Amino acid sequence: MQRDLFTKKLSSSSSGVNHQENSTMGPPSSMSMPSTCHPTSRSPQKSPNSNSPSSSEQDLQAFKPVLDYSAYFEPHDVHLEERGTFRVYTINHSSTMKNQPVPTTTTSEPSTISSASIKSININNSILGKKSKSDTVLVFIHGAGFTSLSWALCIKHLQQFVIKSGGNMQNINFLRSPPTPMEMGNNNILTNAFDDYEYCAIDLRAHGASHTSTNDLDLSIETLVDDVTSVLQKVYQGKKRDFVLIGHSLGGAIAVRVAAKMDKIEDEQKKAGLQVNSIMTVRGVIVIDMVEGSALSSLPNTKRFLESRPKKFKTMEAAIKWSVQNGVVNNIQSACISIPSQLQAISDEDHSEIMYYKWRTALEHSEQYWTDWFTNMSKLFLSVRGVKLLMITSTDILDKELTIAQMQGKFQMKVLNRTGHCIQEDDPSHTAEVLFSFLSRFRL
């Protein structure tokens, strides 16, 4: 199968997989499926004898967008001088911040994202940081064209694993030996180690609800890495924090480079005599479906995909349906949450009516940066200090350097071969179990 950076469509005969139920633990009770979304991972099939408009409308109802994401995240806008405003979604942070209106977008580029209860903040002295027993922040970085909402279901499942870990005797064994404390029945260790996490997901520039004050089309890897590093420094500066960086596709490339950069910053701070309780440390890096060799070889397919995809949609439902049917996301429930944030509403002249939706991110204009996104990633991934996990859909995409390093035990690897490229959306529960097993194994 030819790969590109965005899709891998699952065939209808793909082992009958339901991506919502692919683990030893079913969906948490607090994570009820949106009633407007079809419960399976495949597109609903129309009756062969039904071509009426009413049938088409019923078909689109299965793709009704979920615009209220308050059950998954608390959104904030983080202002950075000379960079712009970056949307940050969090769980388990301080609730003492005052509500302020979110800056509106320009009339020619209205946002399609629900802004209810969004907090707009100028962060000072880590106001967003919440004191927790572990002081560990899980940072989620999305891929090109996606947004932070692509992590919504995965993080919800992961949070439930963390909360229930103290008394739930599940046999989580997705990674190789040694067994985790949970597998050994040592629940007291897990109760202490997993008392709390902060979850933080960042919309990259030109993606989602982030709006930069400089060049929004500058998607160079250096700029993206500086953006993410600056957001983390603004939010957590002056507080001891241990970070686990989790990135999907381009987000994985960014996570690796941010980790390398923060390793250097930590070394400089220690040499300067900075107090240990104010140093930020990257303890782990998790890369999802991003391998240098296969990513570089897939770039021609990526260009063809972007040229062939529709430029606009009449409704959000139509965009969600197209994304599912073309393998961008193979899970309707997740697509209903994440795809709307990837769209931008275009209104008529008096802004009284939405004429159509277009893609928020003009990925076709970023082609000049694609090669640099992934070049030297294998070497960088292996060089960062934190423990490392690579989650992929097939071992066939491993390059020589990673294959040798994996056999030498330099990083952990997990293959989820019944998903598409967007692993965390196609199978959020299984992805969350793998993440939790990795976190527990290394006491992160």
Image (cartoon, rainbow, N blue to C red):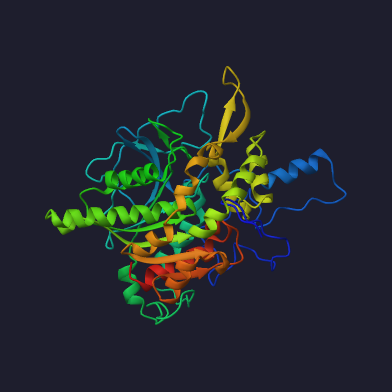
Q: Is residue 245 left or right of residue 413?
A: left
Residue at the far left in the pictured view = 273
Task: Give coordinates of residue 127: x percent, y percent.
Answer: 26, 44
At a point 13% along the width and 53% down the height, the residue shown is 272
Foreground residue among 247 and 51: 247
Q: Is residue 86 left or right of residue 241?
A: right
Does 311 sit above or below residue 256?
above
Quarter occupied by the N terminus: bottom right
Residue at the far right in the pictured view = 49
Does 201 sit above or below residue 188?
above
Residue 72 seen by the camera: no
Foreground residue among 183 and 288: 288
Foreground residue among 193 and 296: 296
Quarter occupied by the C terminus: bottom left
Does 337 sit above or below residue 444?
above
Task: Give coordinates of residue 285: x percent, y percent.
Answer: 38, 61
Does 345 sit above or below residue 422?
above
Residue 186 seen by the camera: yes
Task: Give coordinates of residue 244: x percent, y percent.
Answer: 35, 59
Foreground residue among 24 and 420: 420
Q: Is residue 93 left or right of residue 269?
A: right
At a point 27% along the width and 46% down the height, the residue shown is 233
Please state the total of marks drawn on the protein image: 0
Task: Give coordinates of residue 161: x percent, y percent.
Answer: 44, 66
